[in-house]
Image (cartoon, rainbow, N blue to C red):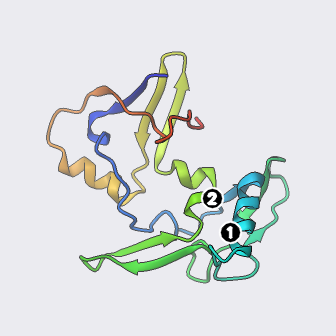
Amino acid sequence: MTTFWLTTHLSYACRHTGVCCSSRWPIPIERARAARVRQAISSGLAAPTSEAWLEPRPGLPTEMAGVLALQESGACVFHRPGAGADHRPTGACSIHEARPASCEHFPLVCVIDPRGVHVTLSHYCPTAVDLLFSEHAEVQIAEGPPVLEDGRVPEG
């Protein structure tokens, strides 16, 4: 499937600022991914900041196990803050390989239609915002790489 991007977004690469992980958002997690998280916790590969890492939510679609719990700070229970070389906040996810689909896709916003996948970035993400100011060429729509590294079609 052909993927179209704004030229200013083609160079996007997550800088791990942690803003998306610490914004007090309810993060739904799919049942299959929640099972992988449980396995990672039991094997010692992941450690939530609280034993109650999964909260049930009535009304979620049946494929969802619930939402990830939040730390008192508002960050996801699996987010580990740190500081980058420039002393800006950065972070790491202790369940990165099993993270929910919404985390995997953020900040990508996709519309899928018969012409292909049309991608833009949420400007809630500081990295995406920086791209608006660092690119000085005319913004155009261009064919670009697949949204997900392994070629899966994103949700949209």
Pointer 2: residues within 10 angstroms few (<14), some, or many (20+)? Answer: many
Q: Nearer the viewer, mark 2 or mark 1?
A: 1
Q: Is residue 10 above or below residue 46?
A: above
Residue at point 46% right, 42% down? 149
Q: Residue furthest left?
A: 136
Pointer 1: residues within 10 angstroms few (<14), some, or many (20+)? Answer: some
Of mark 2 and mark 1, the one earlier in the sequence is: 1
Q: Is residue 19 left or right of residue 76?
A: left
- In the rendered image, residue 155, in percent from the top left (x then y), is placed at 60, 37
Which residue does the numbered mark 2 point to in the structure image?
98
Residue type, numbered disc 2: Ala
Residue 85 in view (yes/no): yes
- In the rendered image, residue 154, in percent from the top left (x then y), is placed at 56, 37
Residue at point 41% right, 39% down? 120
Residue type, numbered disc 1: Ala
**SS class of the residue under badge 2?**
helix
Task: Report the number of discs.
Answer: 2
Q: Which mark is residue 40?
A: 1
- In the rendered image, residue 86, in percent from the top left (x then y), is placed at 24, 76
Residue at point 69% right, 57% down? 28
Which of the 4 image quadrants contains residue 37?
bottom right
Q: Are marks 2 and 1 in contact (CB under 8 Å)?
A: yes
- In the rendered image, residue 21, in percent from the top left (x then y), is placed at 52, 67
Q: Which mark is residue 156?
A: none
Work out which quarter of the rendered image holds the C terminus and state it: top right
